[in-house]
Image (spheres, rainbow, N blue to C red):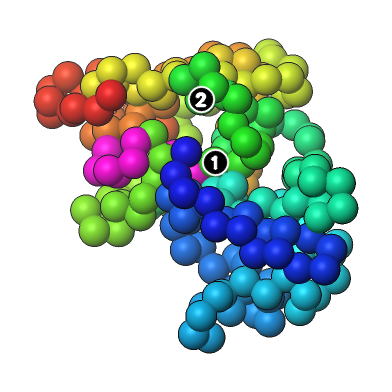
Amino acid sequence: MSRIHRYTGEQVIVEFELGRCIHTGDCTHALPAVFDTKRTGRWVHPDAASADEIAQVCADCPTGALRCVNKETGEAILPVAGKNTVSIVADGPLYVHADLQVNGEPEPTNRAALCRCGASRLMPRCDNSHRTCDFRDAGKVAVPLPSDAPQTGRLSITTTPDGPLMLEGPFSLLDADGNEVCKSGKAALCRCGASNMKPYCDGSHHHIGFKAE
Ligand code: FES
């Protein structure tokens, strides 16, 4: 886990994990008075909106970089648990919204952005390297997997050394247009960026000499 910055207000504490943030701008658009990157000094102002509004924006952060904590109880206000989804972002990462563990460790929140271009220096997380390496993939799914799994319960994601992301557990896969293309209990998803069957791994990582833990 990377360093966490804490911003304390009257009712809530906003936690910000810089290593997860890929600057999607969701928070600054939703509540510009609270999440204000233009001001000098601290950029989060937890008393500039209601606790409910701040909790909702933190819950909507697609990477899990923002978390909201009830100041009185000290408990995290997590996004509402629903069905597990893995969403493909065109020319970008996978957004995972799930009861999630990564490499055997439960995640502190149920959102994550995972690299699929192969260039991240924070594997398996996205660090925006898809922009600098000019990764291109429209996020369509040509060959759906069988749809036979329930969509709630824990989703486990494991990184294969020098290979794909192995997903095990219930999830729904959404293409870049938001269409549900399959429900599956198991899948191997490409993280090297070279597969000709994206989002699935087709073994191309062997041919390009992909290296990642
Ligand atoms: S990880 Fe990309 S083809 Fe296997």
In depth, the one of 139 and 41 nearer the eye is 41
Q: Mark 2 highlights which residue? A: 102
Amino acid tagged 1: Ala
Determine whether the residue tagged by mark 2 lies in a helix, strand or loop: strand
Amino acid tagged 2: Val
Q: Are marks 2 and 1 in contact (CB under 8 Å)?
A: yes
Q: Position of residue 92 (x, y in %)?
A: 40, 50
Q: Mark 1 highlights which residue? A: 112
Q: Position of residue 180 (x, y in %)?
A: 64, 36
Q: Position of residue 166 (x, y in %)?
A: 44, 18
Q: Which residues are magenta?
A: 113-123
Magenta residue check for 118: yes
Q: Is residue 178 visible?
A: yes
| Vertical order, 122 against 34 (above or below) | above
Q: Is mark 2 within 8 Å of ligand 1?
A: no
Determine whether the residue tagged by mark 1 lies in a helix, strand or loop: strand
Q: Is residue 64 left or right of residue 12?
A: left
Residue, x 60% and y 25% (percent of image)?
106
Residue, x 51% and y 80% (percent of image)?
41
Residue, x 72% and y 59% (percent of image)?
13
Q: Residues within 10 Å of mark 1 (few under 14, many from 20)?
A: many
Q: Is residue 116 visible?
A: no
Alpha carbon separation for disc pair 2 and 1: 10 Å
Quadrant of the rendered image containing residue 96: top right
| Vertical order, 179 against 50 (above or below) | above
Q: Is residue 49 left or right of residue 212?
A: right
Q: Is residue 113 left or right of residue 136?
A: right
